[in-house]
Image (spheres, rainbow, N blue to C red):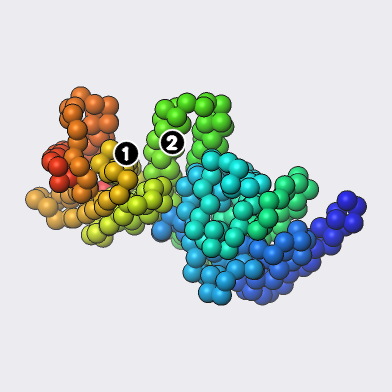
Amino acid sequence: MLDKLRRHVRILVDIGRLAGENADLNRFLEQTVVQIARAVEIHHVKVLQYRPSTSDLLLAAGVGWKEGAVRSSTFTIDLRSAPGRAFQTAEPVSIRDFRDQDEYIASDFLKEHGIVSVTNVPVLIDGAAWGVLEVDSTTPRNFTEDTTDFLTAAAALIATKIRGRERPEEARLMVAAAEAQKREVLLREMQHRVKNNFQLVLSSISIQKRRYAEEGAHRALDHVASRIHAISLAHDQLSFRDEGQNVRLSNYLRALCGAIRQQVDGVEVEVECDELELSIDRALPVGLILNETAMNSIKHAFGPEGGRISVRLVGGIGYGEARLTVSDNGRGIQNFNENGSGLKLIASLARQIGGAVDQESSDRGTTTSLTFPLMT
């Protein structure tokens, strides 16, 4: 045990030395994953970087994976994914054997490499998750608290390197002292704090799920988590435009559709968006309506064979309006209830932005349209 601790300390010192060198981030990560593999005595290690534009985790660096996997393979941030759970809750996640549990789903990538056991720790910058550090085993393995502590320390060194890379740009912005640049710095700080809050809420939901065995309670909590995640994605897309906090609505909806696509197998989500912007107060209801409508289709429209959801955002409708259309090719709404809670929520969200919702359903599918004014 003492020899293991000494090895961990020695390798953390080596990683810290690498972080202090002038090598670029990719080179640093490539060297760091090799050091981590030595420390944990494992063949497979990866660093996953969150990409707000696509709402996924990119394999930014790794060792032990098939040729071409690094910088091209992606992973979901769904709460059923081990790295997704670690990223969203900012807490470590360990699985001794995927085959002995049903809370998490092993990705096709892990299955392809024969991985059965993993442990993940978030890479945190100012308390917000930048990505995830993961080690993977092809045999069942109980990752000890010492291993988790080592990985947490390694993730902190990775965060230090990333943070150090950003500082020269931040210094330049502060020296320039332009108002727009100051607002960008403040915005990033606000986004970090907001993400921290979302992570705390999602972590609480995860804890609550473990307290209840009923499938209905799990479904309800998952639905709440998906709504929170939809709001979190909007904050990822925030930028300052014309003295206000605006969201590139097209980017937001694409990222949201990417997250929805990750939550279920057998359902394709097609997206076509005009390039539009809205204030965040108006973009959030649009995103929540999309999320609610798509999740309704996933739950009720399709059988085991799956199906397709098509999302289209078009500007220039009527007099300064836009239209969001969400269609599926499912079996239609059975026992249509105009007073259902889902439709009431969608109608309430539409009223918040002065919009109107129409819904048509038949045995060839359901189409929901939101028409709303393009005011920022």
Crowd rating for badge 1 (residues with CA inside 10 Å; few <14, some 14–19, many 20+): few
Judge from the rendering whether residue 232 lies leftward or rightward of residue 28; answer left or right.
Answer: left
* Residue at figure coordinates x 20%, y 49% from the top left: 329
Reading the chain from its start, which is encountered first: label 2 or label 1? 2
Q: Residue at x 48, y 50 (%)?
A: 77
Q: Amino acid at mark 2?
A: Asp
Which residue ends up furthest to the left in the rendered image? Answer: 318
Would you identify the image quadrant in which residue 154 lies?
bottom right
Q: Could you say where residue 68 lies in the image, as x and y percent from the top left?
A: 53, 74
The residue lying at 30 percent from left, 49 percent from top is 305
Q: Seen in the image, is 138 located left or right of residue 280?
A: right
* In-front residue for pair 1/275: 1
Q: Label 2, on which residue?
A: 222
Q: Which residue is labeled 1 in the image?
A: 299
Task: Tell me: residue 342, above or below residue 298.
Answer: above
Does residue 196 appear in the picture of this structure? no
In the figure, is residue 277 to the left or right of 357?
Answer: right
Report if the CB atoms under discs 2 and 1 are less than 8 Å apart. Answer: no
Image x and y of residue 239, in percent: 39, 54
Residue at x 26% of width, y 52% of height = 308
Mark 1: secondary structure: helix
On the question of residue 271 being in view, the answer is yes
- Say which amino acid is labelled 1: Lys
Disc assigned to residue 102: none
Q: Residue 18, image x and y in percent?
A: 73, 69
- Which is more toward the observer, 93 or 108? 108
How far from the left and from the top, in percent, is residue 255?
37, 54
Q: CA distance from mark 2 to mark 1?
A: 12 Å
Query: Of residues 43 and 15, which is closer to you in this image?
Result: 43
Q: Quadrant of residue 312?
A: bottom left
